Amino acid sequence: IKSKKEKKKSQLIEQEVSVLSASARVNTLQPLALLNQILTKNYNINLESFESNDNTALAVFKSENLNDIVQLHELLKKVTMQNKRLTLDKTQKVLKLNFDYGEL
């Protein structure tokens, strides 16, 4: 049988875990929300994959049209992002964007 003090401590720990869990979900979505704000609608470009962990994000874009992916590359070059790294593969029409988002 738990004492009142033990029950209170358990409740506090559960609340902290809940808050940390919710915070982790929000932090995971932050970089995706940032990309959504920056990018204009272009139905010729697909977000092929998106990963985020340890305050670093990787987005991989692909297009059937080389001009569209080059335009996206030029747009993202102008955007300020922490530790931004862009890799454009013109042959595959793929653009990879890595960036840090710990201080958004």
Image (tube, rainbow, N blue to C red):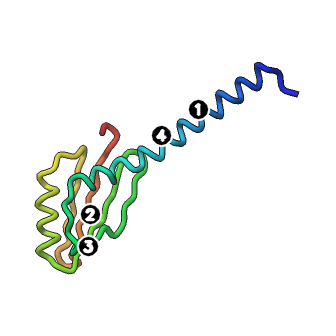
C-alpha separation, residue under disc 3 versus residue under disc 1: 40 Å
> Residue drawn 58% across and 38% down?
18
**Helix or strand or loop: what does disc 1 sit on?**
helix
Residue behind mark 2: 96
> Residue drawn 43% across and 45% down?
26
Which residue is most to the top? Answer: 5
C-alpha separation, residue under disc 1 versus residue under disc 2: 36 Å
In contact (CB < 8 Å): disc 2 and disc 4: no
Residue 62 - label: 3
> Residue drawn 40% across and 53% down?
52
C-alpha separation, residue under disc 2 versus residue under disc 4: 27 Å
Left or right of 7 on screen, residue 27: left
Pick whichever of labels 3 and 4 is earlier in the sequence: 4
Residue behind mark 1: 16
**Helix or strand or loop: what does disc 4 sit on?**
helix
C-alpha separation, residue under disc 4 versus residue under disc 1: 10 Å
Residue 26 - label: none
Vertical position of residue 2 compared to residue 68: above or below: above
Give the amino acid type for the residue marked by disc 3 in the picture: Lys
Horizontal and vertical percent position of residue 83? 24, 46
Give the amino acid type for the residue marked by disc 2 in the picture: Lys
Structural crowding at the residue carrying mark 2, measured as other residues with C-alpha within 10 Å and reported as few (<14), some (14–19) or many (≥20): some
